[in-house]
Amino acid sequence: MSWTGRDRIRRVIDGSMSVVFTATGAVAILFIFLIFLFTFKEALPVFTDPEIRKEANLRQFFATAQPAERIDERFVWQPTSDQPKMSLIPLLLGTFKSTFIALLFACPVGVAAALFSSEFASRRLREIVKPTIELLAGIPSVVLGFFALLILASWLQDAFGFTYRLNAYNAGLALGIALLPIVFTISEDGLAAVPRGYREASMALGATRVQTAIKVVLPAAAPAVFAAFVLAFGRAIGETMILLMAGGNAAIASFSLNDPLRTLSATIAAELGEVVFGSAHYSALFFIGTLLFLITFISNSAGNVIIARMRRRMQGEAS
Amino acid sequence: MSAVDASLNTDHHRSRRASDAILLGLLASSIILTLLILLVILGVVTARGAGQVSWEFLSQPPREGLTGGGIFPAIVGTAALVLLMTIAAVPLGVATAIYLHEYTPAEGPRLAWSRWVASKGRHGRFALLRRFLSASLAVVVRSAVANLAGVPSIVFGLFGLGFFIQFIGRGLDRMTQPPGEIVWGQGSLIWAALTLALLTLPTVIVATEEALRTVPPDQREASLALGATRWETIRRIVMPASLPGILTGAILGISRGAGEVAPILFTGAAYYLPFLPQRVTDQFMHLGYHVLILSTQSPDVDATEPLLYGTVFVLLILTFLLNLTGVLIRARTRARLAGR
């Protein structure tokens, strides 16, 4: 074969490989689209099918209240009773209570740890801390759920004398452990991206290292820290196994953090296995899935946009 | 203490130093707390679980309604699931990372657009328009990957059920099986593995792209200058050099996939199976799912508890070893990158 012939083959191979790689790149877009499409498709009867709409519709989910005084009797999630009641209010409250506790724990601890690691830790300490955090992130959520269900719940009850072993504190704390690595890693990246000039200028003006860290570096990295909170929120809303195991599995509409709870995600996990295919309950569970997808999609997009913008700005200032 | 320090030691400075020390203590205690949490979880699980692990525990199926025997089918099921998942996720993830790092322009779409606009009337300006389109596609792919990483794992489970089982599986049955026969259209190893593959895809992509970044651009340029095509450069120069990073991505992905339970709840995990999966269309037992079952649905809590701790110990050790390997390889890669 002549050289030119071989070159032509090489060029054809090169061209087709670039098409192949571009196509695989597009697969990620395709699947994000398909995930929404197929989750929403099963939820669609909630909007269109008159039979299903008798039991499950938006008004049922968010507005319908039973004639009762107490909030836990007004908003009820009982999808399998003779008179199915499908208010999402108890589940939304459960999700927000556990997320609230989790963020309350993970945000301050994660940011403080990140600040220490990026501003004060020696290189050797950092080399221990970072992999450890990654190991913490690597604990399967079912193991965290198990830990909260069997061990943490008893410790907390012994310490604080809770009426119910499984409550929002227990579930939230376990969820917080899962969020810690997220808050830490993203905040740490943001803090490390703050240009050295900021620190040098602050110290030159007589500030101590602690003052520099808290009053100069932390505010400069504020967008990244905020993004860390937003991404942690997204993870908290969607996390399933921890809440399924440690939340107490009681869909009660209650503002009390002492009560057991059931989140949106745990409801899908607990009920989809036994649901009648194509029923109103089935569609309602997929509606919850769509809701989770949308909430996490929005919070993740927001978090990632903030991070990208901050990175661009810091690069601009550093150069 | 030097003379200068001593002269600074006024009340003001002393109080400043005290408050600094308190704040620093608070920051440090956050780190200590984080490390402590990991140690406590590890410690408790090891203390109560390690003793349960014996050859019998690892090699026997569960008995007496999950109150006796071992976890052999769950280990085999997890291994089979993770193997299938890896076969699906790693090639796709690596290819996506190669696309993102090797086939997209370095500049963002905004810059590419302004270059295209500024090139009006010049020869060959359509290459600039292509660069703009390519840069735009890269941004969309990147955000899709980032969003894929954030989709809740239970939603992956719903997707697996709705797409792989109901849509693809039932479709396959209609085409290949006699009417009424269901082979593909039910929860099984293959659908659970594909669902998990999707979930681990972002992990593989991010780690691989990081590895590709460690290959110096000069090496690519040298290869291209010697007449190699882009694909030849990738295959002969870039891929071999970034192999450790790609391996890291695969390992971290496997570790993540091995521990996830929510996506497989409805796509094929079984409560109890007396036999091992033989085909990809069989259901399977799974370590993580077994932990869930043992801790929430045991008929006899006291009899189950030792088995539960043993199972958690095995699952935790498995994911930890995988993770540690991945993290260590990555630390070495990063050190090499920083040293450059």
Image: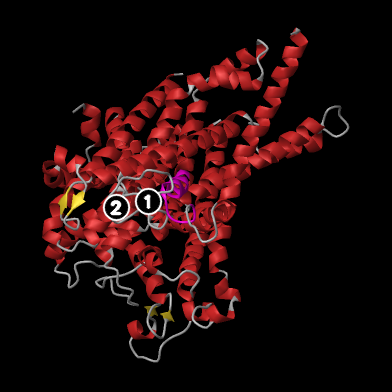
The front one of B63 and B214 is B63
Q: Are marks 1 and 2 in contact (CB under 8 Å)?
A: yes
The front one of B317 and B210 is B317
Q: Which residues are magenta?
A: B184-197
Q: What amino acid type should be assigned to the residue bearing mark 1?
A: Gln
Identify the disc placed on residue B273: 2
Q: Where, quadrant-wise, is the N terminus of chain B in this rendering?
A: top left
Crowdedness near tag 2: few (<14), some (14–19) or many (≥20) residues, C-alpha within 10 Å: some
Residue A49, image x and y in percent?
Answer: 59, 77
Q: Is residue A189 left or right of residue A24?
A: left
The subunit letter for the residue under badge 2 reads: B
Residue A290, image x and y in percent?
Answer: 51, 63
Residue A125, image x and y in percent?
Answer: 27, 32
User: Which residue does the numbered mark 1 point to in the structure image?
Assistant: B283
Q: Is residue A223 visible?
A: no
Q: Is residue A161 left or right of residue B273?
A: left
Reply above or below: A244 against B42: below
Q: Is residue A313 visible?
A: yes
Per the image, label 2 sits on a secondary structure element best described as loop
The residue drawn where x is 25% and y is 53% is B291
What is the tally of numbered marks visible in this picture?
2
Residue A9, image x and y in percent?
Answer: 72, 18
Crowdedness near tag 1: few (<14), some (14–19) or many (≥20) residues, C-alpha within 10 Å: many
The residue drawn where x is 54% and y is 34% is B97
- Magenta stretch: helix, strand or loop mostly: helix
Q: Is residue A72 magenta?
A: no
Q: What amino acid type should be assigned to the residue bearing mark 2?
A: Leu
The residue drawn where x is 72% and y is 23% is A12
Q: Earlier in the sequence, mark 1 or mark 2?
A: 2
